[in-house]
Structure formats: C-alpha cells, structure tokens
Image (tube, coloured by chain):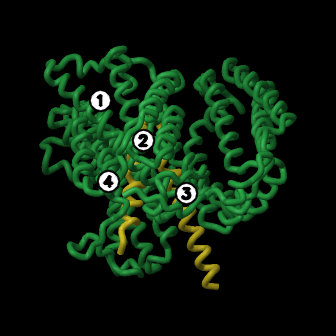
Chain colours: A green, B yellow
Amino acid sequence: MVTDSVQASSLSPAAISSPASQQHPLRRIAGLAVLFAAEVLVISARTPHIALQDSPGLPGLVFSLGTWKVRLLVTLAVISLLVWRSRAKRNLEAISERPVRAGVAWVWFTAHVAAILLFAGLTSILFQNRLHGAAADALVLAWVAIGVAAVVLAAFAFLPAAFWREVLRGTGEVWAYVLILGLGACVLAAYATPIWNPLARWTLRLAWLLLRPLVPGVSADPVSMILGTHGFSVQVLPACSGYEGIGLILAFTTGWLWFFRREWRFPRALLLIPLGVAAIWVFNAVRVAGLVLIGVAGAPGVAIQGFHSHAGWIAFNVVALGTCVAARRISWFTTVGADTALVPGRSEPNPIAPYLMPFLALLAAAMLAGAASNGFEWLYAFRVLAAGAALWYFRDTYRAMDWRVGWPAVALGGLVFLIWIGLEPLAGSAPTGEPPALVHVSALARMAWIAFRILGAVITVPIAEELAFRGFLMRRLISADFESVSWRMFAWAPFLISSLGFGLLHGGRWLAGTLAGMIYAWAMLRRGRIGEAVAAHALTNALLAIYVLVSGHWQLW
Amino acid sequence: MKSALFKVTGMTLLMTALGGVLLAVPVGPEIDGATAGNALMLLGGAVLLIRGRKR
C-alpha cells in the first residue's frame, strides 16, 4: 500500500508560502555547503599534503593537525548530538523557519572569491615549497587567517549577519559545553597513551595462553612482543593492545546509557561500561590468537590481509550490540521491562526491519567475506546471498510497495553513471586492471565471480540500499512514525542528510555518491515510487559494470 | 541537588564517550577507512533496528 498522507514536514507553511524575494534558510545553507565542498575539493586535489611531513615550526604543526581531522569530525558529531538533545534544537528550528532574503549578497561574495583565491595561492606556496623559519610561520598564520576570513565572508554572502547572530544566541551554552568536552577529551586521550604498552603486554600474554593448547611450540616474547611459531609470527604493537576497541566501546556504551537514560536503573546500569570494556579486550586477545592460528594453519595471506583489519570491527559490533540487547532484555538494568521481542508469540513485527535488514545483511556479509579474504574478496557471492535471503524473507511487505518504473528513472540512472565517471578523477584511486587473483584462476571460477558481482550490483545492492536510504532514512528523518510519511514527501534536511549518508557509504567517491543519492531520491519523490529509485540505481550499476568490463577500470568495482 | 548530580553524571559520561572516541581514532595506517565506515554503519543500523522494536 502506498500511503499519501502528509504527516510532517520540515518546511513550515510560512516558508513554503514566502514571497519570491525570500527563501528558506536551509536552502541557503545547502548552497553554502555545496560551495565549500567544491572549493575544498578543488584546492585539496592540487595540494601535496605529505610535503610538510617533518617540517619544523608551524608548517610541521599543520601537517600533524591533518591527523586530527577525524577527531574534529567526531567533535562536530558530538556538537550535533548535544544540539539535538537540548533547547538549542527548538531555537534552531524556530530560526530556520523564518524566511531570509533571497539571492546572494554580491559584495560579500566578491570578497569571498578574492579571499579564496588568495587562500589557494598561499596553499600552493605553503605546500609546494619546503619553507622554514619565521617567514614560514608567518605564512601559516596568514594562511589560517585568510581561510577563516573566506569562510566568514561566504557565510555572510549567503545569509545575513542577523541570522548568524540569532544562531549564536540560540545555541549559546552548547558551545561552552562543547569546548569543555572537547578539551577534556583531548587531555584524556593524550594522557592515556602510557597505558598502551602494559595493555599490549597483557594482550600478548592472554593470546599466548589461548594458543598454547592449540599450537605446539607457540611462544610469546614480552621484549620484542612477537607471538607465534617459527613458521608464522606477529608482533603485538601498542596499537594492537585493544585500546581502540576499548575507546569505541567506552564511547558507544556511555552514549547508549546517556541518550536512553530514562530507561535504565542507575547506578547499576553503569556496570555495562566495565563489562563492555572487559569483553572487548578479551575479544581483541582472541583476535590476535585467531590471527596466529590462521597464519599457522597455512593461510598467512588471509590472516594478514583479511582477518587482521576486519576481525576487530566484527568484535566491536558483537560486543556493542550484545551490550544493547543485554541491557534491554535484563530487567535488572532497565526500568521499562525486559524486551519481549525475541520471545516467540510475544513479539510484534518491527516496522523498520523490512527496510534495513537487507542492507544490514549486505554490510555484515561484506565484513565476514572481507575477514576471510586474502586481499581479493573471493566470497563476494556471500553478500548477494545474504541480502537476497533478507529480501526473500520480507517479500510480503515489499509486495505492498509501488515498484512501477517510468522512463525518467532510466534517464536519471544514466545521468548518475555519467556523473560517477566524470567525478572519478576526484576519488584519488589509481586506475587498476583486472585483479591478478581473478586473472590466474580457471575461466569457470572467473565467470562465476563476475556473474555474482553483476548480480549484486544490479539487483540486491540497489534494492537493499534504496530501501534503507530512501525508503527508510529519508522518511524517518521527517517523522519518527516514518510509515505514515508519504513517499512523495520532500523536506530539505532529510533529503540532504540521507544523500550525504549514502555518499559517505562510498568512501573516496563521497561526492559522486551524495549527488547520486540526491538524484535517486528525486526519482522516488517525483511519483512516490520506490521502484523508480531502485530502477535508476540498478541502471547506473549495470552501466558501471559494462564500463568496468569493457574499459578495464576495475578500481570502480 | 539531584539535578546537579544528574548533570555531573551526564557530563562525565559524555566526556568518557568523547575520550573513548578520541582514543579509538588515532588515524593510523592500520585503520582501513572503508571497513570502519561499513562497521559503524552496520552498528548504527542495528541500533535503529533494536530501538524500532515495539515492546
């Protein structure tokens, strides 16, 4: 059944009916974001960041700050969550519903263009000449100042100063919290470094104890931190001590307890934190032992290239989800009664499951297949089968959706293909030919792998991803009761966020992925049919498959 | 008093969370961005799924 009831909208009636001389602020912010993204892409594509490595003074600091990019993103995510959960959200909603003047303030914009050109010039001088001394430090300071000025000028060009004043006033105390949290967390992270070494020694010890009954002659040297046999051994570096998993579990369990705090019995629910930490540390030692076991068993390629990078993330997901499920199912922890959903006969259907399960099955299968690979994902078929099984399981739900397809979907699918190919130079991936692993196998095995790869790209992936991002996420961002949101319902923030999420799924091709997400969303919204988005996505992937096989640009797969 | 205690507990939890994340992402070459992205997206989706259950 296709519901047409419009339950919610992030666009207020005032914004929709505003005169042509005024515009919704979110549209202006979207324009600003597109401008910044384009400028950053163009400038960074021409910037050899590595040139500043080991430079003295401020240029060296600029290089080392590059490694904090992810931490900055995390801090921004925490800001968003704080804003989302505070009075600031209501203030921002009120501000965003007031229309602002349409058009760009050209004086500010001209000043921005001048500043960004100057910034690009200074970037080129800074990164392409290995400068040092006072002149280099002065250049870095000027570079930062001009960059900040360019951002501020663009902000004023797209939205008036009064709007930004209101935003600052409406979110005032949140910035103070974020500053305290950010600085506190950085200090905590810096002072936690000395615990890595003892942790690595304990990990080595536990992994050795686990291996001893299974592998004859296994040894562990606490000085060199080498664990294994004469045939295969690994070095347990501080980074393998398990602190990354512990950090992630700390973040996840505390976040989980905080955001759903009304559901837990405190202080006993706090026990979940040390339990999660202990579990992930033990899992990490098991991972190290598993790594040695696989290597000793005669598959060092799988151990190093597949299992090593995937097993830690699999363990993290298992422990994190185990904590969630345990917390909800054990009444000793929760105030709202144990979760009965897993008890046969007492559970109600989960409305989210038909939309998310195929996509989650796809991701889980990719992780497991990756863990068992030796650099080439021989088990790709596993992804197809896992997503296919989930789609089959929920087939009755899908029958009620609108799968009709019109010609515009075909055109949009073709358009995304052209965009994908056109933006490929920005992805930063070097052209590769057919993977050697595939070249050196029998013709039958090669054909079977390619057949499953095409089957996945054209059938299971488009259905699973469109159900998750357009069918669920975009509508869920409009209303918590996503099933009542019309398939034709449009709102800027859900449209942009779901498309960006889809873009990020594609790693280095995030820009092409985001644009693709927007186009698939538009395909669906035009007539309110999920089938249009799936068909457009499937056609893009089919054209990409043909392009890969004909041109030999296998990096696109 | 209770409210202040609640706020302090909340702030401590959030600092622990943020410190945890900063510990976890040293952005070393050993971290494969694509694998990390897939794992975090899988976890996020699974959490949504768990929260989506009707009790």
User: Callout 3: 10 Å neighbours few (<14), some, many (20+)?
Assistant: many
- Quarter of the image where one finds residue A445: top left
Q: Nearer the viewer, residue A550 or A399?
A: A399
What's the residue type where badge 3 is placed?
Answer: Leu
What's the residue type where badge 4 is placed?
Answer: Met
Is there CB contact under 8 Å for labels 3 and 1? no
Callout 3: helix, strand or loop? helix
A430 w.r.t. A484: above or below: above
What's the residue type where badge 1 is placed?
Answer: Gly
Residue at 38% in and 49% down:
A467
User: Callout 2: 10 Å neighbours few (<14), some, many (20+)?
Assistant: many
Where is the C terminus of chain A found, in terms of image quarters?
Answer: top left
Callout 1: helix, strand or loop? loop
Which numbered marker is on residue A375? 1
Same chain for the residues at labels 1 and 2, yes or no? yes
Chain assignment, label 4: A
